[in-house]
Amino acid sequence: MIAAEPSAHIEGLVLCRVGDNHIAFPAAAVGSIDQWEPGGVPAPHARAAFGLPAAPGKLLVRGGFSLVVDGLEIVADRSTLLPVPSMLLGAVGGALRGFVSPSAGALVPLLGLAEFSSFVTRGGA
Amino acid sequence: MNPLKGMHRWVSLPSIWAGLIGVGLAVLYAAFTAEIREGTRVQFAVILGVVVVVANLMGDSYEQSRLRTLKALGFGLEKPTRDNLSKALGEASRIPDTVFWASLAFWVVSSFSVGVIYSILPGVGWAEGSRLAFIGLALAPLVSVLAHLSVLRRARAVMSRIIAQGVATNDLVRALPADRNQLQRRVVLFVAVSAFTPLVLLCDLVARWGFELLATMLKTDEAAQPQLLAQAPSDGLMPLVIITGMTMVVVVACGWLGGLSLGEPLRAITAATQRIARGQLGKSTIVPAEDELWGVAAAFASMEHQLITALRQLKDAGSKISSTTEELISSSLKHESGAADQTGALSQTSATTEELARSAKQIAQNASDVSRLAQAMLDSAQHGKRSAGAFYASILRVREGNQAIADSVVRLNKRVQQVGRIVEFIDGIADKSDLLALNAELEGTKAGDVGRGFSLVAAEMRRLSESVMSSTREINRLIEEIRDATNAAVMATEAGVKATDAGSGLARQVTESLDRIVDFANQTTDAVKAITLATHQQQSGTDQLAAAMSDILRSTQSALGATAQMSSANTDLSNLSGELQKTVSRFEVSS
Amino acid sequence: MVSLPQLTRVPGAPPHLLGVFAHRGEVIPVIDMGVLVGTKGETTSRRAVLVRVPRGSLALTAGRVAGVSMLTGELHAPLGTSGVQAHLRGPAKAPSGEVAIIEPEGMFELLSKGA
């Protein structure tokens, strides 16, 4: 398990903004990016996981899974990957892969797109 | 109860008593003079009785026939109308004379009848019958006078009753004309009868007695004759005294009755006169009387009637004068106060008129000033009119300018909207570019080191797109501001157009008003000129008016003096009428 | 005892998990004890107690630190048989009054299951 390995790195992140919070996906996990409006293509919204209402944003698509976020940017540089604490192992429907720190002092949860999409679709919180 | 019931019988009854007294006297005389032969006394009594009864019945019937109306009124067969009462009054007034003449006639006839009938009795000669007739004839005037006087008093009483039934004084005077002035004749006749009857009877008695004595002396011898002569006076004295006494009683009774018949009316008239002298004019007194006495009584009654009427009129006139004078006084007082008020008012009016004259002068002066002011006003108004015209033209130009601005702003707004659509288009393109760049960057990143350069280019392109988008957002914001500004400008210019519309309307109104003002000012100037002229004329008029008012005031003051005099004269008149009423009220005139 | 930095929220986390923070290269979850024991408040606290157990670390928020005291004597019995109460023992006498003593390892286990 990656999370268990200490002092790892990851290259290519899609850093997403959801309200005031941030989540990150591995760039490889994202197929394409598109625009999304409420009433458009039915898709789970990451805001739901933070208890926020839906809003226009970008649609991340990979295979049969999709997820809407408020905004995103792509980080091509290497980022430090911190392991999942043992207490949070299996949290977020098993979507939590660790925490990245794209800039100093910042800590962003790294998620698997498919698992997180499923988690949000299930309405887990 | 009819007050006239039985009066016809009552009034004539004394004639029967008088006749019977006369018969008594005649029988007594006949008895003393021994006229009735022995053996014929019964026959004589029968003859006498029959003749007396017949004569009385006939006389009474005659008298009653002369009292027909009185009898009818007494029995209620006739109504007591004015005519009937007047007739009854006339009957009652004539009955004493009727009784006298009837009594005289029946006595004469009866005397002859008794004498003749007695003469034809067997053994009775004509001499004896004529003696009886003589006695009756001798007593006839006295008996008639007695009957007349005794009936007279009753007749007056009946007349009084009839008058009390309501005979007016005028009717009375008409019914009993006071033109028979026979008092003298009546007194002469009465005195003659009173003297004649005793004289005749005494002469007859003395003669009779002398003849008897002579005859007796002739029959007796001479020796007895002196004794007879000495005895004779005492023999003949008794019958003489009795007969004379009886006759004198009758004569005195007649005299008493005659005196009463004269005195009673005079006493009544005297009493009435004294009553009037005391001022008591109750009802007019009517004293029934005859001849000159009736003339006096009637004249007195007329006089009293006239006096009552005059006094009543005087009383009415007095009260009327009194009330009229009071009214006159009050009205004169009113008039006086009215005149005083009038004088006061006129004084004020006079003063006012003088003020008016002064004011008129002032007005004339003011009118001249006003005329100058009006001319100035006219000039100002014309100046104002020119200014208002210029203002109106300016307003119209401003309005046109405003309209042009409004059109420009609308055009600008349209342009801005077009720009907005273009910017929207650009924004869409930038958005799509951003997305493309994002996906390209993703792909580059996924490719690892190989795609690093690609990623950098894509990121750069993405930044470019984002910069475009931020610019379009800025442009949109500016467009919104421009839109707000143009909207405000449109509204402002519309308000400006409206304001200039209102301003131009106002300016037009002002121009029109000033036109009117100029007209008015023209008219005013004309009017003021006319007023100036009129006030100059009025000034002289008011001067004349003030003078006239002074004259009127003087006249009114003198009229006030005259009114005061009239008032005092009225007061005198009132006092006089009061005195008149007081004088009249001393007479008690009851209706 | 640590002062908490800006916490990172974990999506879909239970209410008592306030977030995580990095501490010496390690991600530490922060647990709000007030929410856990059912009392409201103390969520704005910036202080926490860092607890290390053999399996890992966690931070428990504290509204106010009353002081540090030594506890002696026998072990207290748990307050309850299930849930949070099973891992709290007491009451124990302390100078500031009666306190409950957290059993760290049991608590860690419980939270790991619930999370």
Image: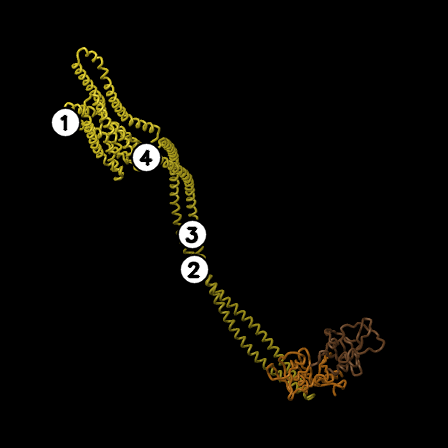
Chain colours: A orange, B yellow, C brown
- The numbered disc on residue B512 is 2
Does dot 4 land on a helix, a strand or a loop? helix
Q: Is residue A26 left or right of residue B366?
A: right
Q: Chain of mark 3?
A: B
Q: Position of residue A46 (x, y in %)?
A: 66, 82
> For the N terminus of chain C, which image quadrant?
bottom right
> For the C terminus of chain C, which image quadrant?
bottom right
Q: Chain of mark 4?
A: B
Which circle's residue, 2 or 1, is located before the other in the chain? 1
Q: Nearer the viewer, residue B110 or B507?
A: B110
Residue annotated with mark 1: B120
Does dot 2 land on a helix, a strand or a loop? helix
Instruction: Identify residue type, mark 4.
Output: Gln
| Mark 3 to mark 2 CA distance (whole Å) | 20 Å
Q: Are the residues under badges 3 and 2 in a single subunit?
A: yes
Q: Is residue A12 above or below residue B124?
A: below
Instruction: Identify residue type, mark 3.
Output: Gln
| Mark 2 to mark 1 CA distance (whole Å) | 159 Å
| Mark 1 to mark 4 CA distance (whole Å) | 76 Å
Q: Nearer the viewer, residue B460 or B104?
A: B104
Q: Position of residue B211 (x, y in %)?
A: 17, 17
Instruction: Identify residue type, mark 1.
Output: Ile
- Nearer to us of marks 1 and 4 is 1
How many other residues sit within 10 Å of disc 2, few (<14), some (14-19) or many (≥20)? some
Instruction: Identify residue type, mark 2.
Output: Glu
Q: Residue at left 39%, top 51%? A: B527
